[in-house]
């Protein structure tokens, strides 16, 4: 089995923990290809014997990779998309960051158990829908796909007017700090923090949410993921930032961004049927309330 291991912005402590995981994989005889930044961190952590291949981008990622292993937090997992692109290589994550909502394991020991399960074939693969943006002013090297969200946001102190058309049908102009279009996967990320709903992965929808709207009657909008959403910023002379997950570029007022569903998904490695709800409970403290921990009819139960 061939694993590609990816990590970025790796500190000394994380480097030592990653070295333990890589050493475990080497001892199992698994074939490895390592991202060049990860190689440097592992060598700094004392793991100098690395009988592994190397890759520096999606262009030189080996063709026969079976699983792409993201070592880091959610930002690293999101960046994995720019590596695997449309090749549909399953991506699994081991959390070496803070929250790690998208990752499947939260410690080196759990990471070893995770890769053992993958080697044994004890895992499932989910298809997560992606967003695609079309924008004439986008830099040539900007990857125009996103797993979580695409957003347009003001930079200066002035609110911006945001014109939105869904399948050619105009809706009332938003006056806000920005606008965010999220996938179900991204519903628990930036979209959640600006008041969007939690959506179960696999739902065939997009979430359109204004950021700090200057209207009392504005709410998030759920549309089918077959929709084509055109967004035009009414902020002539003011700088606006266009973002796709954790990548951003400047956007000019008066220009239009078209957002639609990507023609390919991101394949994600999962374990068990209730992983999403377990993550809501464990990492976002969903339903955390002292009233949910109590004895009912003589039995201790926890309601969710």
Image (spheres, helix red, strand yellow):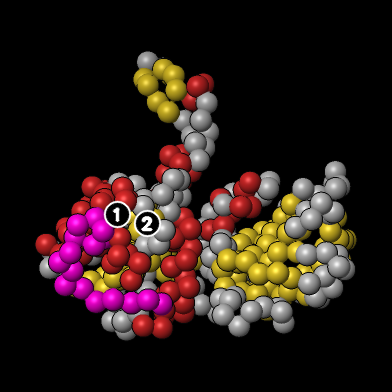
Q: Does the segment drawn in magenta span residue 191?
A: no
Q: CA distance from mark 1 to mark 2?
A: 6 Å
Camera sees residue 149? yes
Write down the quadrant of residue 300 in the picture: top left
Label 2 CA crowd tier, 10 Å (few <14, some 14–19, many 20+)? some
Could you tell me which quadrant the N terminus lies in?
bottom left
Query: Mark 1 and 2 residues: CB-CB less than 8 Å, in contact?
Result: yes
| Of residues 61 and 220, the one drawn nearer to the viewer in this rendering | 61
Q: Which tag, 1 or 2, sits closer to the chain's start?
A: 2
> Secondary structure under badge 1?
helix
Task: Give how far across and how far down residue 183 sits, in percent.
Answer: 59, 62
Residue at x 46% of width, y 41% of height: 283
Q: Does the segment drawn in magenta span residue 48?
A: yes
Left or right: 204 with respect to 303? Answer: right
> Residue 10 bears which disc, if any?
2
Q: Which residues are magenta?
A: 42-57
């Amino acid at each position: 089995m061939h694993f590609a291991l990816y990590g970025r912005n790796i500190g000394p402590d994380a480097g030592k923990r990653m070295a333990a995981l890589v050493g475990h994989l080497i001892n199992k005889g698994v074939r490895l290809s390592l991202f060049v930044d990860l190689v440097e961190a592992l060598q700094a952590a004392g793991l100098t014997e690395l009988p592994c291949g190397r890759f520096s981008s999606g262009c030189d990622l080996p063709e026969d990779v079976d699983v792409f292993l993201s070592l880091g937090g959610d930002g690293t997992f999101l960046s994995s998309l720019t590596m695997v692109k449309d090749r549909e290589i399953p991506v699994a994550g081991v959390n070496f960051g803070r929250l790690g909502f998208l990752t499947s394991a939260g410690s080196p020991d759990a990471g070893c158990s995770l890769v053992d399960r993958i080697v044994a074939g004890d895992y499932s693969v989910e298809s997560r829908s992606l967003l695609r943006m079309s924008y004439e002013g986008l830099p040539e090297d900007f990857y125009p796909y996103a797993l979580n969200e695409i957003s347009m946001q003001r930079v200066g102190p002035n609110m911006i007017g945001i014109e939105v058309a869904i399948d050619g049908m105009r809706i009332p102009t938003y006056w806000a700090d920005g606008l965010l279009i999220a996938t179900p996967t991204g519903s628990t990320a930036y979209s959640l923090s600006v008041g969007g709903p939690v959506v179960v992965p696999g739902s065939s929808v997009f979430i359109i949410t204004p950021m700090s709207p200057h209207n009392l009657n504005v709410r998030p909008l759920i549309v089918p993921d077959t929709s084509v959403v055109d967004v035009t910023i009414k902020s002539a002379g003011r700088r606006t930032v266009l973002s796709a997950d954790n990548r951003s570029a400047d956007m000019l007022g008066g220009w239009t961004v078209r957002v639609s569903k990507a023609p390919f998904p991101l394949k994600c490695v999962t374990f068990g049927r209730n992983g999403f709800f377990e993550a809501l409970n464990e990492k976002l403290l969903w339903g955390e309330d002292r009233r949910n921990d109590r004895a009912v009819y003589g039995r201790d139960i926890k309601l969710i």
